[in-house]
Image (cartoon, helix red, strand yellow):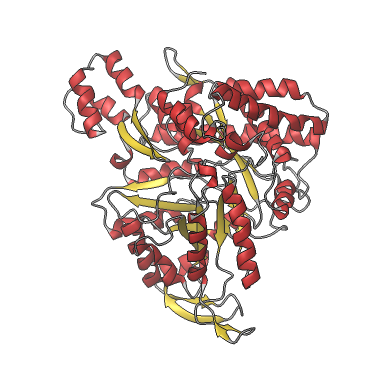
Amino acid sequence: MELTENALKVLKTRYLLKDERGEVIETPEAMLRRVAVTVASAEGLYGGDASAQEEKFYELMASLRFLPNSPALMNAGKSIGQLAACFVLPVDDSMQGIFDTLKNAALILQSGGGTGFSFSRLRPKTDVVRSTGGIASGPVSFMKIYNTATEVIKQGGARRGANMGILRIDHPDILEFVRLKRSERELTNFNISVAVTDAFMESLAADAEYDLINPRSGTVAGRLKAKAVFDEIVSSAWETGDPGLVFIDRINRDNPTPHVGRIESTNPCGEQPLLPYEACVLGSLDLSKYVAQEDKPRIRYDQLSTDIATAVRFLDNAIDVNKYPVPAIETMHKGNRKIGLGIMGWADTLILLRLVYNSRKAFRLAREVMSFVRGKAREASAELAQERGVFPNFKGSIYDAPGMPRVRNATTTTIAPTGTLSIIADCSSGIEPLFALAYKRLILDTELYEIHRLFFRIAREKGFYSRELEEAVIRKGSVRGMPGVPPDVKRLFRTAHEIPPEDHLDMQAAFQEFTDNAVSKTINMPKRSTREDVARTYLQAYEKGLKGVTIFRYGAAKRGTLVKFSESD
């Protein structure tokens, strides 16, 4: 395996087995062999050749063309054995329901998973509690309890606790919720999003009021001006980066199993909408490793097709060998068998193809690539269905219709942020543009210094490299306005904050069009951005067909945004 110094640091800090003294006792190759052996063992359930698949899985990971989500790398072959990254748990409107869910969340967080919750079922603040004659404290108070519990769960020292908290836009406590992150140190282990309905967006467009609904009684509990609530959301996001928006009706229109239930929440980074008690195993292909460096660089779709089939089989196997922390989650996951295959290394791919990130050609290629990935992933899922049977909840699903494929998995594709996975694979994260050409990042108290390898390679190829240039790029982090760098190279290496928000949205929309689940993408905004800019971005996200949107304005107060960008691989 060819691993960078940063990759080795991350592996030693997070992934490789340690003894009782905390000393590393496993090599990266042994880790991947452990994962391959564990996941391939599922072949025995279906009369398959576990040894042959083990070699395929190992080769695919050891080449760093594909990596599964972090819990699979950490836990496969260990007693904990929990391989999924994404979970959603219901929060019912009773003291027992609230704390049963907290207990289950603790087990998930301890195993390295990230958990999403909708608190929309909880009765609002000051509502009556008939059993005691008391007054309800409201969903925000219980979110704070969940946050405190997460704080003390160390997840084996491998991953920071990560949660998503969602509240519907028509909940009576919505204003308290959207203002929550403006207070320092509130919900530092939560990303928060508002579940926005189509009805709210219509009221907003009409500059009208809308109804607030008491979830306990289902009755109207008041009315608010849609514009006033939207402005509060925008102000909080401008100031802190939270809340994001989740377009919940759009998500449920794409729910593959509506007969099983309605989707209420997503995982912590928003790319995986899930039913209550549902889980998902994710994996990502480094697309940059499929770029053939010929006279005219191109994507090797033939090899990509082969690897997609192997990756889908890997992820489906992972469902069977997974050790689930809660029986209800095992029932739901094995009932729908959702997997999420996506890509990372997108920015690197575009650079290798000499395409500017925010160009029409890049947006067109995004659609082409993701259409190919989803098509081949569904083909692979259909082949598994012939071999192993369709997912148990198939009857009544969107696939149970003429002309639809008989598939093994209710979903097959997701675009995840791939924070630490991209460090291991030495590629750009998810579908994000380059954050900077040189920067420092902190992974569990381990400081990593990253310099983008492709820029200096191209600088040498084109003959404009110098030691002074390297020092200047490292100092500044970008080549904007830098003398001596050709204009075409400056365009090629635009960083996240040099790309307009509407172009970030267009890239997210291009991938979302061909992704079963959702797309993790941060809409980076410069420090000078106004609240009006944030409002326009949120409205454009809805208009462009996104399932959710998260903005982050450079220089905004980083209150509780620590898990937003990299903790859900």
| Total labels drawn | 0
Quarter of the rendering containing residue 260 = bottom right
Decide which of 566, 288 is in the foreground and name it: 566
Residue 374, above or below 135: above
Does any portion of residue 297 appear in the rendered image? yes
Left or right: 368 in relation to 436: right
Front-lying residue, 407 or 54: 54
Q: What residue appears at the point 38 percent right and 62 percent down from the top-left corner?
A: 181
Residue furthest to the front: 21
Considering every residue shown, the one lying at the far left of the view is: 483
Outermost residue toward the bottom in this view:
133
169 to 398, vertically: above or below: below
* Rendered image quadrant of residue 321: top right
Q: Position of residue 529 (x, y in %)?
A: 26, 53
Query: What is the x, y in percent for residue 491?
Result: 29, 30
Instruction: Check the image and report above or below for 464 versus 138.
Output: above
Image quadrant where residue 375 sits: top right
507 or 217: nearer the eye? 217
Q: Residue 304: tell me if it is visible.
A: no
Residue 188 pos. (x, y %):
42, 56
In this view of the protein, which residue sits in the foreground, 547 or 270?
A: 270
Residue depicted at 47% across the width and 34% down the height:
13
Q: Is residue 188 above or below residue 324?
A: below
- For image coordinates 38% across by 64% down, the residue present is 233
Q: Residue 206 at x, y = what percent?
A: 42, 70
